Image (cartoon, helix red, strand yellow):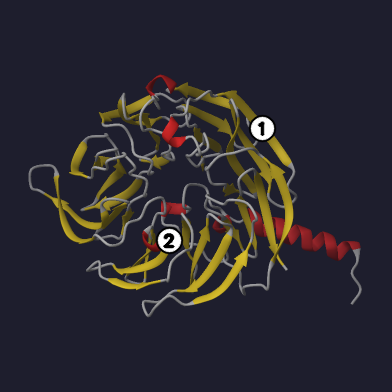
Amino acid sequence: MTITMKSVAVAALTLLTAQAQPNRDWPEWRGPGRHAVLRPGQAPAAWPASFNRAWSVAIGEGYSSPVVSGGVTYIHSRQDPQETVTAVDVATGAVKWRETYAAPIGKNSYASQMGKGPNATPLVTGGRVFTLGASGHILALDAASGKRLWSKDFSAMIDTSKLFCGTAASPILAAGAVVFQVGSDIKGGVVMALDPATGAERWQWKGDGPGYASPILATVAGVDQLVTLTNRTVVGLDAKSGRLLWSVPFPDDWHENIVTPVWTGGKLIVSGIRQGTRAFAIKPDGKGGYAPAERWKNAEVTMYMSSPVAGDGLIYGFSAKRKGQFVALDAETGALKWASEGREGEQATILLAPAHVLYLTNTGALVVAKRTGAGFQEEKRYDISENQTWSTPVFMGGAIVMRDATHLLRLDPK
């Protein structure tokens, strides 16, 4: 077979077109709808023997995950004492733009081994990129040029003198507004809805300091609710007005409410390192509010930093027990369906592909397991990084866009 320059150009154009397709976009924390479910065409058609590094871009530290929109990946990172938002062409690895700003943040002694963030994942919507830094800086940037459209500074609310490690909740689009959750253990917290174009405040709810989890949207009895964790509770807010609709206690000795909740359509799943995993039904109380009721609790499955995924009538998760276990719970009863042997790591990000559950552990192992309630069935395992990997990867057909401890990477199937 003869390969011509024309055929190479056609192949490159095909690749770029595929990468820019909307169903390949991954514009926010855990992907569209925050379900952590891959869209058609995002998972590899067949799992390869291995992956090769196509490009690598030095970005600095952080736990923020990459997002992808229109063939461009956006990442938030720190080169102390500054934070940086970087836009990178997915096809070539070329840096399209960078926006850097001063963001000093203190660290308390208990968290000295942890990075300084940023922790929240960017949101791309309406041609804009929205970010929230660890010290409470909010940026709205033009997605094409990186031009700063507006910004806000909530660093005065971030107090890390005791337990808190900085702001971590990823921004979310709700009722046409961009919602941010900021604050700290000492100074309390705020959930606010801002106009995407101007940054003008539409509503605000004040409460306890935020947890490290990110809010989700859940439609309950026809009402869109923002569900999020504070450092003491789980709350549901009216997405249009910010009115508190319900709350349930969810205390933690170290204020480590880290796991993003999951709404199955009938139950809200929340988990914590000292709370176990619990399911709540959220129903109208007949008085203009809602009455959350616990439906089950599994005290033996304790999720710490890893957020679960719902599918197949199961809750796929990663328990902190036995030095890290892949687990599956019955979504209706909370009963443990299966658990791996353990020693998988401190954390794993979890995604659902059409036929598989994908786990990326903090040690750089990508585990491909069968979607089933009949036991943990590993089909593939790849060592895709020699460095720590704490963030959610983006699958783009055969390619993977991911970050390790210091770099943004694209891996291609070999």
Q: Position of residue 384 (x, y in %)?
A: 64, 60
**Residue 167 in sight:** no
Give the residue number, with chain letter if any, for mark 1. 98
The quadrant holding residue 295 is bottom left
**Tag 2's secondary structure?**
loop
Please give left or right for residue 318 compared with residue 15 in the image. Answer: left
**Residue 396 in sight:** yes
Q: Residue furthest top?
A: 156
Q: Nearer the viewer, residue 73 or 348?
A: 348
The amino acid pointed to by label 2 is: Gly
1 or 2: tag closer to the N-terminus: 1
Q: Residue furthest left?
A: 286
Checking the image for residue 42, the label placed there is: none
- Residue 396 vertical placement versus 199 (above, below): below
The amino acid pointed to by label 1 is: Arg
Q: Position of residue 263 (x, y in %)?
A: 31, 56
Checking the image for residue 324, the label placed there is: 2
Q: Residue at x 43, y 61 (%)?
A: 324
Q: Position of residue 303 (x, y in %)?
A: 35, 55
